[in-house]
Amino acid sequence: MMKQWLILSLLTAVSFCAFSQEDTTVVYKNQSFTLTDVVIRNNFDYPAFIEYVKNDTTFYKAFRNLRVLSFSSYNDIILKNKKGAVTATMQSTTRQTYANGCRTMEVKDEKTTGDFYKGDGSYNYTTAEMYAGLFFTKGKVCGETNIVKGTTFNTRGKSGMAKHKEQLKQLFFNPGNRIPGLPMIANKVAIFDEDVAKLYDFKIDKQDYRGYPCYVFTIRPKKDLSAWDRSNIVIDEMTTWFNARTLEIIGRNYSLSYKTGVYDFDVDMEVQLEKVGELLVPKVLRYVGNWNVMFKKREIANFTATLFDFKR
């Protein structure tokens, strides 16, 4: 009996070794990518997938799609000072209505604390302004589209905080692309450029995410970077889940941080997306951020946007 058990154990170990392989490193266009065993065994066309990832615009487009849809939103914002004490909060439920090429918004209920608003009703925090720019509509806005091709984040004619907000939006919602006009950081986020890519490890895996089989693309800084190279890192981690059947993004988590004499930030975001008809839209967005721009007070904020009841 003992002999049979030993033989069975040996066969099991041999079988396990036959089907369990280490990750494989491949070189594509002078860049290294790690492929997990499950990706290799599925004969996945990784060059085509890498090109798809490089040129993908669907993540940003998902936010643009909010301009041409009706939807409701639960909004929860918590703002803190540099010591971590809560200074203001806002919880609300809103409903955006899109009709005849125009969108309007109704506040169903809202509760605020602290100095969330200024005396004139404007936002007292830049984080709140950015949130409102993404999910709120003021008055009646007409003539917008969700077209992404040929459009760019534009800072032309903008200065001061308006310019910074436009650049931060690109950093947060179109990560991995150059950001024109952002001092000392513009090229550092272009993670597929050869001089930046050498600082990162890229990995392709296959996993389930929210019940969907997905290809997972993960970006992390290399572990053995010198202090100088480490100082050039902006994207601390970015993981994107692509639906294995359609290759549409259904989730992305990312951490960004950087510090200069002019500004600094340390931000974590989680975005879950879903399909509404033919349109991809953000369903849940969670943000934890600590950032500061010269001549402005530091802002530490947590917010969650939960979007639902979409209609075309």
Image (tube, grey):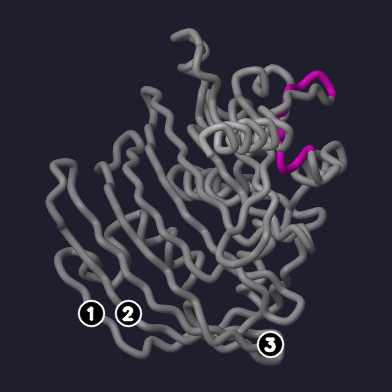
Q: Are marks 2 and 3 in contact (CB under 8 Å)?
A: no
Q: Amino acid at mark 2?
A: Ser
Q: Are marks 2 and 1 in contact (CB under 8 Å)?
A: yes
Identify the residue position indicated by label 3 in the image.
Answer: 312
Q: Is residue 26 left or right of residue 214?
A: right
Residue at coordinates 68% horizontally, 87% vertically from top-left? 312
Q: Is residue 234 left or right of residue 54?
A: left
In the rendered image, is residue 36 in sight? no
How many marks do you count on the picture? 3
Identify the residue position indicated by label 2 in the image.
Answer: 92
Give the SS element for disc 2.
strand
First to last magenta residue range: 29-40
Residue 121: horizontal and vertical position, in percent? 28, 73
Residue 177: horizontal and vertical position, in percent? 67, 38
Residue at coordinates 60% horizontally, 19% vertically from top-left? 199
Q: What whole-number distance in Å separates the C-alpha atoms at marks 2 and 3?
A: 23 Å
Identify the residue position indicated by label 1 in the image.
Answer: 111
Q: Amino acid at mark 1?
A: Lys
Q: Looking at the rendering, which quadrant does residue 181 occupy?
A: top right
Residue 187: horizontal and vertical position, in percent? 63, 26
Task: Give whichever of 115, 187 is nearer the camera.
Answer: 187
Give the SS element for disc 3.
loop
Q: Closer to the N terminus: mark 2 or mark 1?
A: 2
Task: Give whichever of 270, 114 is nearer the camera.
Answer: 270
Q: What whole-number distance in Å separates the C-alpha atoms at marks 3 and 1?
A: 29 Å
